[in-house]
Image (spheres, rainbow, N blue to C red):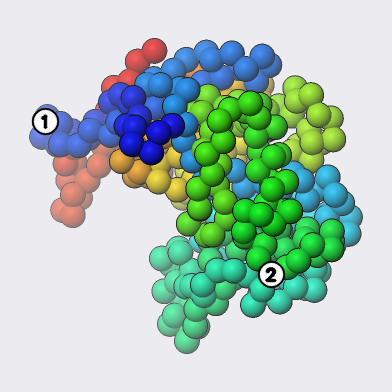
Amino acid sequence: MSTNSIPADVPLLIMNRGGMPENVHRGRIAVVSAEDGKLLHACGDAEESVYVRSTAKPIQAIASLLDGAVEAYGFEPRHLALLAASHRGSREQVEVLEDILKRTGLDDELLAIQPALPVGRRSRDEYVAAGGKPRKLFHTCAGKHLGLLAWSKLKGWPLEGYIRSDHPAQQEVIRRIKLWAESAGEQETIGKDGCGFPVAALPLRSLALAYGRLASPKLASDCAAAEAAGRMAAAMNAYPELVEGRYRLASLLLEDPNIVAKSGAHGVFAFGLRRERIGVALAVTDGTEVAWPHIVKAVLKRIGGASDETLLKLNRTFPDEFLNDAKEVAGRWEPVFAW
């Protein structure tokens, strides 16, 4: 993807107010078979690259699991869920992060991120009201950083500079992501993520395949990596609210045992369906998150994979109609993409 190119996106979702379109969210969608990598459905250019951002977190952890981090530190599924997390700073999430520090013998001052307050509004308000101060563990990517530091300690690699692209852990992470997404032959584009990590840009189709394989890891050719990926996915389903938080789309989807899901920043979202052996990735070009639930609901209704209970939760949490401050219906979200 050229730095000057504009993605070949299409309208995905319209916000109607008073019967007139007020906002149009454009983007791209890729639906891929996890069995053979075949592109089943596409809206916009599925070959156009996208920075994977935090959707990569479960895959970034694969290499550390292959090197025995779970056994070395006694990690449990709840710890693995935090390695994949974009956490909101809830008490439960921070308790697990503190336990990771204890088990690994790491100091949170090693984290190459700035002190922060909880991302979640309720957690932040409660913490500040109690006199809490910013700390590095509240950064939404703290789990990923701790996981890489713990792995580097295990391997004897330098702990300083662990976020640099020339650090051996980062080089192995990028290699693993590209292998898992079967994009090793693609032209490599590496940027800097919001938390300081190098971040790979992959074709949207490849990200969809990566999540199809995350949901159905036995389809991957690397058996050891498949076992590690399966452990990560199972941990995410076992502790959905640790992965993101209550009322977050990914956490709600993870409550369904058939779905593995994770959000990324600036409009990127991906999920995989176990029974259907399908992966889905979408990128909303304006970078907004508000469009995700309505696009995901429409995709699930077309291809299946979600239980009736999950669809009910989605509709209850993210209704198609939206209200104004007087609690009156002000408009409606309407998916407009076709394949």
Residue under numbered circle 2: 160
Categorize mark 2 by other alpha carbons within 10 Å: few (<14), some (14-19), many (20+). few
Secondary structure beneath dot 2 equals: loop
Q: Position of residue 300 (x, y in %)?
A: 48, 24
Q: Is residue 310 above or below residue 265?
A: above
Q: Residue at x 40, y 46 (%)?
A: 266
> Could you tell me residue 116's position as x and y percent?
48, 72
Asked where in the image residue 236 lies, by quadrant, the reply is: top right
Q: Which residue is mark 1?
A: 20
Q: Residue at x 85, y 49 (%)?
A: 67
Q: Is residue 165 in view?
A: yes
Of mark 1 and mark 2, the one earlier in the sequence is 1
Pick the front one: 320 or 110: 110
Image label count: 2
Identity of the residue furthest to the bottom in this view: 131
Residue at x-position 64% and y-position 50%: 84
Foreground mark, 1 or 2? 2
Q: Amino acid at mark 2?
A: Glu
Task: Indicate the position of residue 308 as horizontal and vertical percent values.
Answer: 52, 27
Q: Secondary structure at mark 1?
A: strand
Find out whether the residues at labels 1 and 2 contact each other: C-beta distance under 8 Å. no
243 relative to 15 in the view: left or right: right
Give residue 109's position: percent from left, percent from top: 64, 77
Q: Gap in Å between the C-alphas at discs 1 and 2?
A: 54 Å
Q: Give residue 215's quadrant in the image.
A: top right
268, above or below 296, in the image: below
In the picture, the quarter occupied by the C terminus is top left
Tell which of 280 and 153 is nearer to you: 153
The residue at 72%/63% (across/down) is 149
